[in-house]
């Protein structure tokens, strides 16, 4: 019988390296399963127990067969989905193998946009009015009651992928007809103009023990469909926005059923009434270098803390959040015309990180003054749009 603790980590995208490294530093063996096209990715091979690859189009049953075959000769104490698109299959594996962690029903509240909206609404949180794309009379009544425009949203995509703006009922019926048998995998939601915020947090024993609130520049839906420069920045901790967002998140994340883990939640402040409405929540670390943004502002690396939390839970030990710093950070990022854009013209002392990604230009800034961060992002976004910005059709799947 072998000894030692081992985590099976499944990743369809190249991410989560700090999680893997933290596991190894804590004495847990990280076993990585990824897709074949990422076999030569930037993985920390020196600390991995092993790395195996699978074709990118395997069914849930085929992945189950592969993992249970691997489990014949090694024991897995936990299974982690490093990317959102792996969450359902990992939940299925946990239930089949009787390994602790969120199962398929629990994961739905952090993956299925319809499930999370129903649960949030029923728990008393404001959400934009929505309807299932299921019972046609219900849809017709919804459109008679809720003024357009509306958003037709995939229930299980990440971020703003696959969202369509619907201006009038006939447009919806045409879209539903095009979707055919896939239509029940969508929901219809009222379009609420406003400012978009995200709150990234850590939960331990059903309680939010860390959260950090940030505000996007342009809405992600606008950037996804029209292109542009992405920005996000830490909300002023002394502001009503910070208190409202962290307060809502502290109640919402546990209300949907999570006991321990990390979350990335998004909210909109309506231009019409100034109220914050819940948009979505995911049981993962945010993409688009948000983990780096949070670390610059607070000193907390969400990937590493997620690993520390998982290991503490496995060993029956208390999770202790490391010391925080309270600074402000912002990021500016765009698709670039050049493979390796020259950022040497940006030399302000607040620049804390230069993002290295093929055909992208990106910077992270940090300051003790939230107004200075805002000023830098406004200035940099305009320069990025002029010097670097490239456009292309929206991707069908996330690219980070």
Image (cartoon, rainbow, N blue to C red):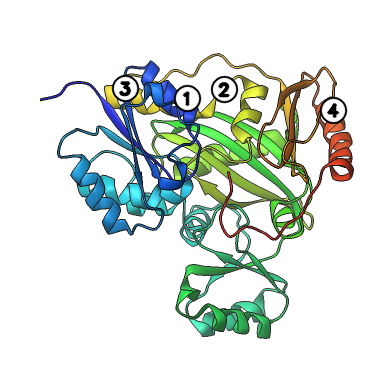
* Residue linked to disc 1: 305
Disc 2 vs disc 1: Cβ atoms closer than 8 Å? Answer: yes
Furthest residue to the top?
A: 323
Q: Nearer the viewer, mark 2 or mark 3?
A: 3
Classed neighbour count for the residue bearing mark 1: other residues with Cα under 10 Å, few (<14), some (14–19), many (≥20): many
Circle 2 SS class: loop
Mark 4 / mark 1, whichever is N-terminal: 1
Label 2 vs label 4: CA separation? 22 Å
Classed neighbour count for the residue bearing mark 4: other residues with Cα under 10 Å, few (<14), some (14–19), many (≥20): few
**Residue 300: assigned label:** 2
Label 3 vs label 1: CA separation? 14 Å
Q: Position of residue 49 (x, y in %)?
A: 31, 27
* Residue linked to disc 4: 371
Q: Residue at x 44, y 26 (%)?
A: 44
Mark 4 / mark 3, whichever is N-terminal: 3
* Residue linked to disc 3: 28
Quadrant for the N terminus, please: top left
Circle 1 SS class: helix
Label 2 vs label 3: CA separation? 21 Å
Q: Residue at x 62, y 84 (%)?
A: 174
Q: Position of residue 335 (x, y in %)?
A: 73, 46
Total numbered labels: 4
Disc 4 vs disc 1: Cβ atoms closer than 8 Å? Answer: no
């Amino acid at each position: 019988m072998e000894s030692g603790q081992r985590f099976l980590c499944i990743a369809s995208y190249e991410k989560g390296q700090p999680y893997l490294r933290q596991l190894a530093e804590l004495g847990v063996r990280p076993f990585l399963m990824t897709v074949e096209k990422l076999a030569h990715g930037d993985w920390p091979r020196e600390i991995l127990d092993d790395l195996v690859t699978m074709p990118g189009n395997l069914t849930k049953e085929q992945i189950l067969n592969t993992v249970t075959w691997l489990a014949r000769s090694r024991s897995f104490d936990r299974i982690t989905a490093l990317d959102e698109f792996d969450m359902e299959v990992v939940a299925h594996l946990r239930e089949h193998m009787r390994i602790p962690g969120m199962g398929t029903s629990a994961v739905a509240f952090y993956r299925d946009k319809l499930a999370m909206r129903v649960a949030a609404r029923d728990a008393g949180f404001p959400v934009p009015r929505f309807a299932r794309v299921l019972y046609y009379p219900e849809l017709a009544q919804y459109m008679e009651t809720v003024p357009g425009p509306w958003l037709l949203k995939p229930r299980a995509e990440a971020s703003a992928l696959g969202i369509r703006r619907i201006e009038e009922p006939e447009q919806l019926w045409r879209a539903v007809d095009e979707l055919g048998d896939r239509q029940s995998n969508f929901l219809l939601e009222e379009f609420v103009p406003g400012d978009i915020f995200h709150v990234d947090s850590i939960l331990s024993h059903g309680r939010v023990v860390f959260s950090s609130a940030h505000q996007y520049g342009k809405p992600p839906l606008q950037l996804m469909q029209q292109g542009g420069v992405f920005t996000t920045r830490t909300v002023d901790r002394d502001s009503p926005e910070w208190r409202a967002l962290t307060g809502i998140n502290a109640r919402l994340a546990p209300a949907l059923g999570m006991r321990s883990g990390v979350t990335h939640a998004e909210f909109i402040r309506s231009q019409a009434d100034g109220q914050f409405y819940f948009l979505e929540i995911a049981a993962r670390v945010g993409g688009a270098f948000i983990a780096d943004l949070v670390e610059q502002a607070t000193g907390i690396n969400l990937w590493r803390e997620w690993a520390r939390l998982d290991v503490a839970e496995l060993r029956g030990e208390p999770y202790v959040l490391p010391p925080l710093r309270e600074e402000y950070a912002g990021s500016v990022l765009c698709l670039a015309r050049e493979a390796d854009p020259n950022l040497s013209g940006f030399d302000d002392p607040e620049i804390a990180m230069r993002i290295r990604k093929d055909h992208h230009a990106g910077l992270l800034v940090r300051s003790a003054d939230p107004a200075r961060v805002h000023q830098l992002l406004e200035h940099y976004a305009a320069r990025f749009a002029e010097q670097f910005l490239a456009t292309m059709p929206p991707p069908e799947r996330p690219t980070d």
